[in-house]
Image (cartoon, rainbow, N blue to C red):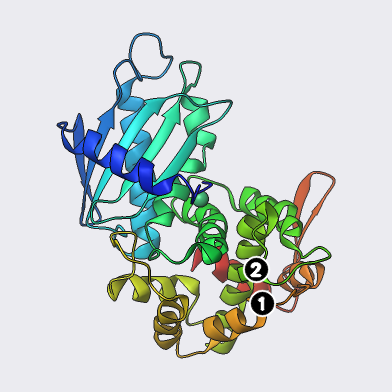
Amino acid sequence: MRLNTVVLPLILIFSFQTISALEADKTLNIGGAKIDIFFSPGVAEKDYKLDREQVLAWVKRSAIGVTKYFKRFPVKSLKLSITDGANNRVNGTAYHGLEPLITINLRPSFTEATLVKDWVMVHEMVHLSFPPVHRRHTWLLEGLATYVEPIVRVRSGLLSEDKAWEWLIKGAPQGLPESGNQGLDNTPTWGQRYWGGAIFFLVADIRIHQQSNNKFGIEHALRAIQRNGGSMQLEKNWEVVKALSIGDKATGTKVLVTLYNEMKDKAVMTDLNAIWKDLGVSYRKKQINYNDSAKSADLRHSLMNQ
Ligand SMILES: [Zn+2]
């Protein structure tokens, strides 16, 4: 979720030292990773409608979904802290470092239904899949998590394809540039960080499919970045072009670096309606509709299911 870059280093040190001194309540081994889970006292216990088994099952299915998408869990070890203090929905934050940390906030009134419809756990785990970068590129991290999270859940049966398209079609217009926009690197607004970044990944995913005759998608680029050491299990930032170049090499294209150069320092008005029409997907009367005779209907299927 939102990374507060100002307070991040302090929280990182505090949380890490606090957590390292404790013994995990539960350790899961999933996708080659050791996931140590820590519950704050009272969380998912007597005052809660949820119990710890339900919370652990939610962690497990989220981690399995992320592993399926990336072909392994993005980092080798993770500390996952489950604490109280959420507002009306689950809150979470991911922190990079040699021992990456995710903090998740719950509250006593949450039920199994809260966890079933939650997107935050997968969103934070997707954050683990990209190296830390300078804060001017935060849109790249949030855009990746915003775009990939629903696809992870579709591919692991945790979300319907209709809901994933609804999320994209309703959300993406918030990422279109407004007046004064100076490109993704220079416009640190909420809309640009989350949905401007998501548009970057949507367009990249489409171009990779088109230029590789549907052989590759953004997941192949992301897996290659991880295989080459690019994940949140790092203390120091990577240069963006280093990561994107590794991704491009894996797909035999120049899509990511080219698109980055297009969008980094100037406003780009992506024609979202043309994209939806081309893919054969629309949202009308509170319902998703598909057109299988659209020009890129096959590509639409590949984006969600490949
Ligand atoms: Zn996030």
Residue 162 x/y as whole percent: 65, 51
The answer to whether the residue bearing label 1 lies less than 8 angstroms from the nearest atom of ligand 1 is no
Residue positioned 45% across, 90% down in the render = 252
Residue 99 lies left or right of residue 286; in this view the side is left
Residue positioned 69% across, 77% down in the render = 296
Element at badge 1?
A: loop
Residue 240 x/y as whole percent: 46, 75
Can you identify the residue that label 1 sits on?
Answer: 265
Tell me if residue 193 comes above or below residue 227 in the rendering.
above
Residue kind at label 2, given as amino acid type:
Asn
User: From this viewpoint, which residue is outermost toward the top?
Assistant: 46
Bin the neighbour count of mark 1 within 10 Å (Cα to Cα): few under 14, some 14-19, many 20 and up: some
Q: CA distance from mark 2 to mark 1?
A: 6 Å
Residue 76 badge? none
Residue 41 x/y as whole percent: 29, 18
The answer to whether the residue bearing label 2 lies less than 8 angstroms from the nearest atom of ligand 1 is no
Element at badge 2?
A: helix
Can you identify the residue that label 2 sits on?
Answer: 186
Q: Earlier in the sequence, mark 2 or mark 1?
A: 2
Residue 236 lies left or right of residue 289; in this view the side is left
Residue positioned 53% across, 66% down in the render = 137
Residue 77 x/y as whole percent: 22, 52
Tell me if residue 244 comes above or below residue 156 in the rendering.
below
Residue 213 is at least partly visible in this image: no
Residue 195 lies left or right of residue 4; in this view the side is right
Bin the neighbour count of mark 2 within 10 Å (Cα to Cα): few under 14, some 14-19, many 20 and up: some
Q: Nearer the viewer, residue 257 or 109?
A: 257
Q: Nearer the viewer, residue 230 or 214?
A: 230
Marks 2 and 1: CB-CB under 8 Å?
Answer: yes
Residue positioned 40% across, 63% down in the render = 132
Residue kind at label 1, given as amino acid type:
Asp
